[in-house]
Amino acid sequence: MPLDNIDEIRENFDRRGITPEHVLFISVLRGLVKAGVLNQGILKISSSEASKLLMVELKARNVIPEGADDKDKFKNFVKKFVNHFEICDNVEFSEEENVINVGFGGDSCRYCLKHVGYAEVLGSLCPFPMLLEQCAKNFGINVTLLGSKPEKRNELCWFSYKVGGD
């Protein structure tokens, strides 16, 4: 979509609850996509570094995972993280043995490069699955993101994580 369709963009931003802070963040990512320097490899490297400052913010604001085991802690942490950074309106989970599937964002995402930043992106360049993994690891949760391409269902983007075990 061209950025000159102000009315349609305003309607989309209003529906999603986009704030100036969301636009600032996504605009920077859009610029990196346009410059051809944002890809999955860059996201992986930068999420590791970004998680260090995010950890300061999360600890300072008492966004600390709670739970009896890594699965409970990870699910609790995901909910708190998504809420704290106002990523979207809801988070859903499903489990299969040591795998937790996390559904978030989608049609209510406030940071989507495609639907908020209007960037032409092949696949997904969502930074949050990797940021969740890195921050959870920094809190001592044994978690590994399984792939970086989301499965879109129920108006959410789903990502899978191996939690606990070896």
Image: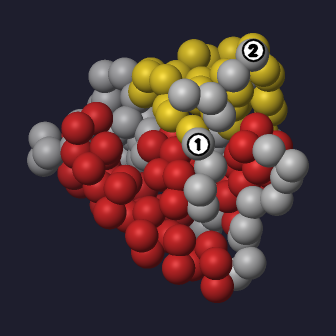
Query: For mark 1, does the 10 Å Cα neighbourhood hold few (<14), some (14 to 19), or many (20 or more) residues?
Result: many
In whole angstroms, how far apart are the C-alphas of marks 1 and 2?
A: 16 Å
Name the amino acid type tagged 1: Asn
At mark 2, the secondary structure is: strand
Q: Where the N terminus falls, by quadrant?
A: top left
Residue occupying image coordinates x 59% and y 42%: 142
Q: Where the C terminus falls, by quadrant?
A: top right
Q: Is residue 141 above or below residue 119?
A: below
**Front residue (pair 14, 146):** 146
Q: Find residue 165 and report its horizontal and vertical position in percent.
A: 62, 29
Q: Find residue 136 and report its horizontal and vertical position in percent.
A: 58, 53
Q: Is residue 120 visible?
A: yes
Residue 142: give its label: 1
Residue 40: give its label: none
Q: On the picture, is 98 further left or further right than 125? A: right
Name the amino acid type tagged 2: Glu
- The outermost residue toward the right is 68
Query: For mark 2, does the 10 Å Cα neighbourhood hold few (<14), some (14 to 19), or many (20 or more) residues?
Result: few
**Front residue (pair 43, 161):** 161
Q: Find residue 56 and report its horizontal and vertical position in percent.
A: 53, 79
Q: Find residue 12 and report its horizontal and vertical position in percent.
A: 62, 45
Q: Is residue 24 above or below residue 137?
A: below
Residue 96: give its label: 2
Residue 161's image quarter?
A: top right
- The outermost residue toward the front is 166
Q: On the picture, is 77 further left or further right than 6? A: right
Residue occupying image coordinates x 26% and y 50%: 45
